[in-house]
Structures are given as structure tokens and as C-alpha cells.
Amino acid sequence: EAQVTQNPRYLITVTGKKLTVTCSQNMNHEYMSWYRQDPGLGLRQIYYSMNVEVTDKGDVPEGYKVSRKEKRNFPLILESPSPNQTSLYFCASSLTAGSGANVLTFGAGSRLTVL
Amino acid sequence: QKEVEQNSGPLSVPEGAIASLNCTYSDRVSQSFFWYRQYSGKSPELIMSIYSNGDKEDGRFTAQLNKASQYVSLLIRDSQPSDSATYLCAVKPGNTPLVFGKGTRLSVIA
């Protein structure tokens, strides 16, 4: 089944404890992206990747890191989480970033709580 | 700043009625337009895409695009309670990533 898989789905952690949210897709998509979703603020892009070893900042990159060493994986790293990073996170991918082939497939979401 | 604006709602319609959802965007070079549906606590799922001016119909859904006026809309005919969700408008401004609106919450009353 074609899908984007995120883990963990739910996580409660404490301020400052490094964590990684993994994202993997099995569709050979070039483009991958991370979003956070907060009430009243909608989906905001954190980082995106056009292809392997190519990453770029989205609208809200502060406090996050990403890497794209393989085409299928795009982990989101929170080096020192803070309570304002409590949110619902979505990973998404598309065939490319270009017009006509950029329909996003989303993962199921990861609900992160930082105490 | 590329912006996509939607009325946050909630938009309440009776079962069987037509629900009309609207979206305006700021970047004139935008080429691709999408409507995603998101149920509470779930991930967004694509329901319609539209690339050229006019109407595009898919079952009970019709997307309408007017590039000159910079708006895109989604009509849902014969609305069902199962259509109750948040609808996200997304616009691709040229070669930059997709920009999402904040969504309109639709409530279909049985």
C-alpha cells in the first residue's frame, strides 16, 4: 500500500530532551515536507526537501532540524524541545514539487506534547 | 508573503443542501489549486485539484477557479453529515512550496 508512515504517533516528553520523529514513504517521491498544525493557525510548513541531500526552510523552522540522506526517509529532529513545540505534526510527500505532480500524500500525524 | 485566505467558519448547512466554500489567494502566478478535507484528528486528504479557469466536477464536488479574480471555490452538492470536516484550500505559487489556508469548518446538520 502506498503510504507515508510517521512514528511515533503520540509522544509526551519533557523540555530539553532531544527527540526524532521519523517519516518514511514507499512511493519513490522526490518531494517531502514537514508541517505543524495548531488550532487557529492552520498547517504551517517547517522544512521541505526537493530531493536527497536538498532541504530548505519553510515558514516556521526555528527549533527544528531535518536531514534527507535517503529518498524514502525525512526525519524531523527537535534538539531541545520546548513547550511551544507542542503540536500535531504531519509529514507529507509528493512525486515532485513541480506543478501537476505535486499532490501531497500525508502521514497519519504525530501528536507531540512537551512538558 | 504569499497568502491563502479562507473563512474559518463554522459553515452550517442542512443535509441535502449545497455547501459553498471559498478561498482567495494573493500570488498571481499561482498555477495549481487543491482542496483537502480533514476530519478532526486525522490527516488531510485530497478531494479536488484544478489547474485551469472554469469548473471541474467530480461526483458531488465541483471546484471552480477564477484566476483573474484570484479565487477558487468548492461546491458540495447534496451535503451529507459525513461531509462535516475542515476543508483546506491549498495553492501552489509557481516554483515555491504549496501554501495552505487555515481551513473552513463545515457542519452538515441532519
Image (tube, coloured by chain):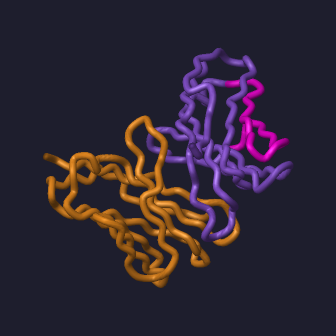
Indicate the chain coloured orange by its letter: B
Please tell me whether residue A68 belongs to the stretch shown in magenta: yes
What color is chain A drawn in? Answer: purple
Q: In this figure, what is the number of numbered marks?
A: 0
Residue B110: x %, y % from top left: 13, 46
The single residue placed furthest to the front in the displayed view is A1
| Left or right for B9, reference A115 | left
Q: Residue at x 68, y 18 (%)?
A: A15
| Residues in magenta, as a range | A60-81
Decide which of A49, B71 is in the foreground and name it.
A49
Residue pictured at 70% horizontal, 53% vertical: A29
Q: In which quarter of the image is residue A70?
A: top right
Quarter holding the N terminus of chain B is: bottom right
**Residue at horizontal 64 percent and vertical 55 percent from the top:** A94
Q: Is residue A16 left or right of residue A109?
A: right
- Residue B15 location in percent, x, y? 15, 53
- Position of residue A64 relative to residue A105, above or below, is above
